[in-house]
Image (tube, coloured by chain):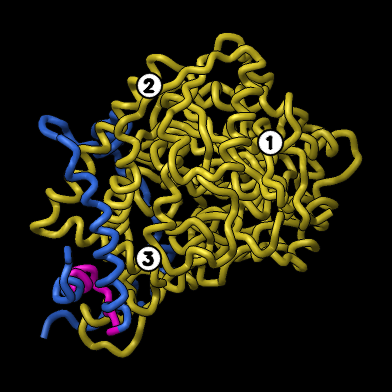
Amino acid sequence: MLDLARNFRMGNISPLDITEKILEAIRHDPLNAYITVDETGAKNAAKKAGEKIRKENNNPLLGVPVAIKDNICIKQMATTCASNILSSFVPTYDAHVVEKLKKMGAVIVGKTNMDEFAMGSTTNTSNIGTSKNPWDLGKTPGGSSGGSAAAVAAGLCAAALGSDTGGSIRQPASFCGITGLKPTYGSVSRFGLVAFASSLDQIGPMAGSARDVAVLYDAIKGYDPKDSTSVDIGYLPTTLDGLDMQGVRLGVPKAFFGEGLSTNVKKAVKDGIAVFKELGAKIIAIDLPNIKYGVAVYYIVATAEASSNLARYDGVRYGLREKGADDLIDMYMDTRAKGFGIEVKRRIMLGTYALSAGYYDQYYKKASKVRTLVIEDFVKAFDVCDIIIGPTTPTPAFGLYDMADDPLSLYLLDLYTIPANLTGGPALSIPCGFTKEGLPIGMQLMAPAFKEDILLGAGITFQDHTGFHEKRPQWNMM
Amino acid sequence: MKISLTEVEYVARLARIRLNEEEKARFLKELNSILDYMDLLSEVDTTDVSPTTHTQHITNALREDIKRASQSIKDTLANAPAKADGAFIVPGIIE
């Protein structure tokens, strides 16, 4: 992205050239990365940007082709959440982050594929079918922001926005060999993001390098009165020089290197930590005793919130309505039966049960209390370290439909990414190696709330000393 | 068994989702397996622990009570599956 901006200014390529090249590549895309492509809008935005290039020297987003996950509203462009219930929905307004990107002159190429309502970690639950991993078309790109990750990795956009409720930016970033940031809860406005689990959801940037991620994060962060969870603090631009690792304390949790972690991921992450150590970082073993409850807490809290948020799809105000019923309740039940896919139904059922009379204390209230204990673990850990480091996922990308019949096993793979959503803190996934078969491996860095600068700084320093992020996948637009 | 078939049917009714027989059988099995896993939490002592609702301590994010324009009726109805005379049309509620 920054390279592209430089090339625009040197006159090597114009925003329209690169946009047309990308649009042409998308026409032959074997990855199923996009749900909607806005050719006309993208070309118009690229033309406009081209005229301004000489005048706006310090705008790194101007003319840059970006993709937006299909749960983020763009005015007059279908926003489907990869669901039949919203397949006809065309927003009448822009999400706050989209408004910001448009103002900066970014070229919005289209909307990327995802798991239905961001519920999943493969894009398998999308109503247009799964996306594929550009490093191996037989493997999943991950999810739920799998379309965004695949598009970035394959060069079908320069950068993308995703959303992360339990790892949906970081896990696909890791599977596709790119860099992805789940920002601090409250630092990026969610106005215009279709809600899944409101105490966990966060929009974030995905790109080819930590520098690009930092630039995109700076473009979208900030206070927005239209989002009542937006935090009003002074946001400073991120330094792109990298962080001096001398004396920086890296906390390595035992729990992140236990049972279930594949040997190739373990080795790549240990090697990645060694890079930081050589640069002067201090490695500290830390304990997060309640982390083993993370998945259980998450799947109660997230599904409970989802069951409430998705009550709005009732066939009245927008989206699908199933005809035939003459009773209102029957109309709701028919519409939701037809409009939602199996994973969304499963989660609504689980969440409704966890909130229902007689079970509320046992499940939802209990999970919310254990969540407090997980948060306290992290508060204590950050007393003795600056960054917590470990793998992003227990395994590299798996086969396209390997996990299709076993929801619980798939949920359990989220164990490393879930904690940052439960605590609200920021977390970054950066590429740190490859398997023998050539699949990318990701490493996760976590910091206390609003310390994105430390994470991105460490990511930039790591990438200045390694080349994992520069390797391109087997399938890319070039 | 944590949840019975009758409870699956009851929860589906609460969630306003009509399930077919195949889905009921599937969810009976899957929800039981997931809820069994959630039992893990019962071993945690949460006496005197307060529940987390949000991670940032923001309270009452209210704007000034000043009159301002909101979305137009036209835009509000733009995506309605059925509409007439500036209103949403729904199946009858009152006999």
Residue holding disc 2: A381
Q: Is residue B14 magenta?
A: yes
Q: Which chain is yellow?
A: A
Answer few, some or many: residues within 10 Å of disc 1's Cα (few below 14, many 20 plus, some between 14 and 19). Answer: many
Magenta region: which residues?
B11-21
The amino acid at mark 3 is Val
Q: Which chain is blue?
A: B
Name the side, left or right, on which A184 lies relative to A323: right
Marks 2/1: CA–CA distance? 28 Å
Of tags 2 and 3, the one toward the viewer is 2
Q: Look at 72% across and 67% down and name the residue there.
A: A30
Answer few, some or many: residues within 10 Å of disc 3's Cα (few below 14, many 20 plus, some between 14 and 19). Answer: many
Check disc 3 and report its element: helix, strand or loop. helix
Pinpoint residue A330: horizontal percent, then vertical percent: 23, 82
Check disc 2 and report its element: helix, strand or loop. helix
Work out whether residue B45 or residue A17 is closer to the camera in this orientation and state it: B45
**Quarter assignment of residue B24:** bottom left
Residue holding disc 3: A344
